[in-house]
Amino acid sequence: MRALGIEGAWTHEPRTFGDARGTFLEWFRPDELGTATGRSMPVAQANQSVSRRGVVRGVHYSAVPPGQAKYVSCVRGSVLDVIVDLRTGSPTFGRWEAVPLDDRGHRAVFLTEGLGHGFAALSEEATVVYLCSTRYDPEREHGIDPFDTELGIEWPAFAETVLSDRDRRAPSLAEARSRGLLPRYGPPPAPQPPPAPPRTPAPATLLAPVSQSLSRPPSPARESTS
């Protein structure tokens, strides 16, 4: 894994093995990630999105704590993946970095809690998969306008750029900061284990019905008088 210019962001370029059948690679190794980053990456949820050319998703982030670390790869097509430092107090606050992801090099990116994430679909259709350290919580999810002039992200030029209504209405970096919505720079929060699944109550034991009639005890043997 290679560290990017924004603290808390790395890329991973797996070794690919090919033969007459096709290719094989290890796209996620938690032990290698831990060695490179000095932290663990618990997987609480795995997501997949499919986007057509010209779609821009982001810039998204989750409130800290607990935040949400992500490990992202493009398994079909190609995207321009963008990481944005949204942590107030960070030496690289407001800085962004772009990493091409595609189904040929199989590169992945890892970003820690507090960083913003987005991407633009470059191919006719692109499938992106995410491993997330915490479950999705709509009450803690936020976004920044991907075309905020203060950020100045250099998105590819498309004949048509497609945004969700949520991303189109997202506040600027300055607005989010004035409203106290941005994460603060500091050490990443300790990873939280995924919540245990709800316990299913054991089925009640069915008791056989008890007969209302009780058998009479046997009569005592009579003494013979003959």
Image: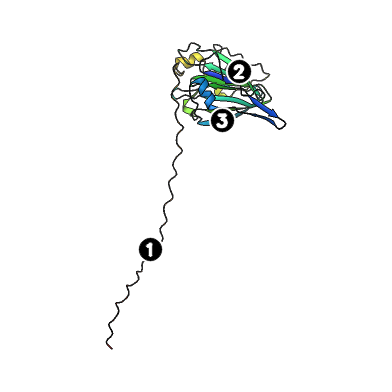
Q: How crowded is mark 1: few (under 14 residues within 10 Å), some or many (20 or more)?
A: few
- State the SS at label 3: strand
The type of residue carrying mark 3 is: Asn
**Please, what secondary structure does the residue beneath circle 1 have?**
loop
Answer few, some or many: residues within 10 Å of disc 2's Cα (few below 14, many 20 plus, some between 14 and 19): some
Mark 1, mark 2: which one is toward the viewer?
A: 2
Left or right placement of residue 211 versus residue 82 in this view:
left
Looking at the image, do the residues carrying marks 1 and 2 touch, with CB atoms under 8 Å apart?
Answer: no
Q: Badge 3: how crowded within 10 Å, few (<14), some, or many (20+)?
A: few
Dot in front, 2 or 3: 2
Q: Indicate the position of residue 25 as horizontal and vertical percent values.
A: 63, 28
Asked if 46 appears above or below 143 in the picture, the reply is below
Q: Is residue 22 left or right of residue 204?
A: right
- Could you tell me how far apart the alpha carbons at marks 2 and 3 are, in whole angstroms? 19 Å
The picture places residue 128, in percent across and down from the top left corner, at: 61, 27
Q: Distance between the residues labelled 1 and 2?
A: 73 Å
- Between 195 and 147, the one lying in front of the other is 195
Q: What residue type is labelled 1?
A: Val
Q: In which quarter of the image is residue 26?
A: top right
The residue at which mark 2 appears reads as 99
Disc 3 and disc 1: Cα gap in Å?
A: 54 Å
Q: Residue at x 52, y 26 (%)?
A: 31
